[in-house]
Amino acid sequence: MSNKGRTDSQVSPHFTDEEDRRHVRERLVFFSDAVIAIAMTLLALELPVPHGQTNAEVWHSFVELLPDEYLNFVISFGVIAAFWVAHHQYFREIHVVDATLRRYNLGWLFLVVVVPFATRVSSEVGDLILGPVLYAVVISAIALLMVQMVRHATRAHLMRTEAPTQRMRGLVVGTGTAAAVFLLSIPVSFASPS
Amino acid sequence: MSNKGRTDSQVSPHFTDEEDRRHVRERLVFFSDAVIAIAMTLLALELPVPHGQTNAEVWHSFVELLPDEYLNFVISFGVIAAFWVAHHQYFREIHVVDATLRRYNLGWLFLVVVVPFATRVSSEVGDLILGPVLYAVVISAIALLMVQMVRHATRAHLMRTEAPTQRMRGLVVGTGTAAAVFLLSIPVSFASPS
Amino acid sequence: MSNKGRTDSQVSPHFTDEEDRRHVRERLVFFSDAVIAIAMTLLALELPVPHGQTNAEVWHSFVELLPDEYLNFVISFGVIAAFWVAHHQYFREIHVVDATLRRYNLGWLFLVVVVPFATRVSSEVGDLILGPVLYAVVISAIALLMVQMVRHATRAHLMRTEAPTQRMRGLVVGTGTAAAVFLLSIPVSFASPS
Amino acid sequence: MSNKGRTDSQVSPHFTDEEDRRHVRERLVFFSDAVIAIAMTLLALELPVPHGQTNAEVWHSFVELLPDEYLNFVISFGVIAAFWVAHHQYFREIHVVDATLRRYNLGWLFLVVVVPFATRVSSEVGDLILGPVLYAVVISAIALLMVQMVRHATRAHLMRTEAPTQRMRGLVVGTGTAAAVFLLSIPVSFASPS
């Protein structure tokens, strides 16, 4: 092999800090992707099959399940997909991962894993207060933690560039708005008759 | 380390646009793979175990489950596997991922996640119209969205080469045919007696 | 950036065949890993919890579940783990992936996905013939398909080296022996009283 | 392409030992991540939905489920997350993976996959001895196996550096303490009245 390309093994028998930095960043992103993908797919696992003996009965059952079960599934899939995009945009700007970011990210994944559960609660006791309130709390916590992760990345100089980019500012505006909307829905749930 | 191989960390402390392009493409492909793999494996989760007290009873139960439950599982596994190959061939030609492709891909994954549900509906109320129609709608939507993704990649110049390759043309023909077959099955389902 | 390291983006704006070869190989391996990991973890999903009101009852229930449910779980985990190692050793020697290998690999993954189902059948109707026979058929099919994959790799020149390595020969011996043992267990199942 | 950057394909048509070393290490880490991510997410799959007809009833049901079901979920998620961090820190120091480390790692993953089951046992028969004892045995086995993996890496010279680093020593102290705490909880479980 030429001395000029990929000389790692000859010059330095053990891998470099640059390989370590990439490995740490890639593994965090990879592990997050696996958790998000599973949470997303599990949403569909509990979709109830419409039942009935005739075409009319099955169709009726399908229409009945539409507003609660099926719509909730579509919304939660869309919410997790939007957060995946946010997570993706965030890590595009991250150059180095530190221990604090690792902890934040694990907390963030914990909340994502709770989304399928919050969706089930919403489908089963959605007419009562607990359903929408739990859902709103979980979603706004995911959004707020993402805002906190942007703040940490700025302060701890984890980003590719010194000044927050357009992408990062868009991320804060988007997740901040989502958090505000869901937080505002909580008093509305308490005010409306169950 | 030689100045000539892998000089990133000395010359440029923060990673390059080329690293970003690869990261974006790889993460999208990776995330898609995780979702497809889970959808595929979940198909097997709901396979019913044949039951009975004697060898003859268990065998009878097994044979009874064969045409609906087990065959549907094999077909759906084959369908998702074929779409994985199509997705794989597609992304081999993709050089850059843009925001529109990211959105299309998330919509495509949504439909793949619905396949295990459509399979369950097909197994449980497959004699009625909803079963085969829902299945045909989901499968042809996956195929048509793939055709649309090829069109977008051509128009937005996301591919490695300017002219669509042999592989891309084969992809359009294959998914287009699949969509046509499944769409044609819908009026047949309505016409045939349930 | 120096013109000498990572000159891809300047010299060739679109990625090279070498990047494509790695991408194809890595994606196949990655996708397989995801499927194997899920099949492995789903084994534990259906483990029954021992029940009872007192310590003695729970312990009794635990001991009763040990030979069928828990032991079958441990065996199937070990079997899938051993096949993961075989798959890993195989792909270490593979330099290029072709369409035939892709198809073989998808068939191989299909059989791996069936293992948790075969384990459930084995636990529930394991005293009857179907349980052990289905299990033996699935496991020996996985082993034989791996032998066929080694033959294909040799014939189609997909490997790093021309002559099959020590690792590849060990793989054929190991999986061939496993297939033989499980295939021999089938007539034994028929002969022994149920 | 310049002869100086990425000359693999010209100089050596087949990939190098350095590519093999990286592939082996990355695949092991990747596969582990997939298994850990699934085990973590499956924890949430079995969370019971609080039930009731009125807000008061649902709230009461939620509060009742809190100490056993929900708290156990949070603890197990935290435990697996902490072990993921330990696994991550461990493999940052690992330069080469050998067959023994591969076996240890598969055994380690087996124990991680058992955690959701141990959590379920803990939730359902947690007042009796089996619940806490099984949980403590599984968690301390995971911790002790990690200590053994550090010892093996030192003896077999698998690490980037000859002397164990600060990170490795911290890992041994952390997992060793966890093992000690959980092992000490076992006699306590037997001593306390059920």
Image (spheres, coloured by chain):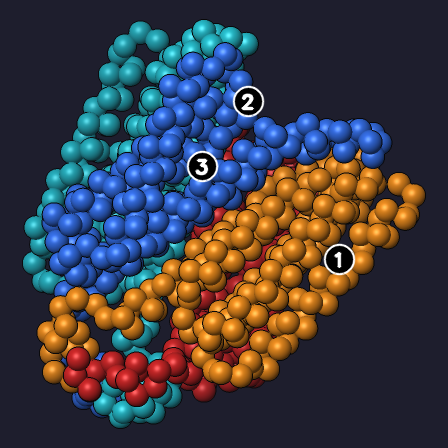
Chain colours: A blue, B orange, C red, D cyan
- For label 3, the SS is helix
Instruction: Name the chain letter of the residue that bears numbered label 3.
Output: D
The residue identified by callout 1 is: B182
For disc 1, the neighbor class at 10 Å (few under 14, some 14 to 19, many from 20) is: many
Q: Amino acid at mark 2?
A: Glu
Q: Please tell me whether residue C95 is drawn above or below residue C141 in the rendered image.
A: below
Q: Which residue is mark 2?
A: A124
Please give left or right for residue C17 compared with residue B187 in the image: left
- Residue at figure coordinates x 30%, y 63% from the top left: D25
Name the residue rendered at 19%, 77% in the picture: B6
Identify the image quadrant of the N terminus of chain C: bottom left
Query: In the rendered view, would you say C90 is above or below A64?
Result: below
The amino acid type, in three-letter code, at marker 1 is Phe
What secondary structure is found at the residue carrying circle 1?
helix
**Of tags 3 and 1, which is closer to the observer?**
1
Total labels: the figure holds: 3
Marks 3/2 same chain: no
Q: Chain of mark 1?
A: B
Quadrant where the image shows the C terminus of chain C: top right
Q: Residue at x 63, y 63 (%)?
A: B82
Determine whether, in the image, residue A139 is placed left or right of residue B32.
left
Q: Is residue C159 left or right of residue C127?
A: left
Residue where numbered disc 3 is placed? D42
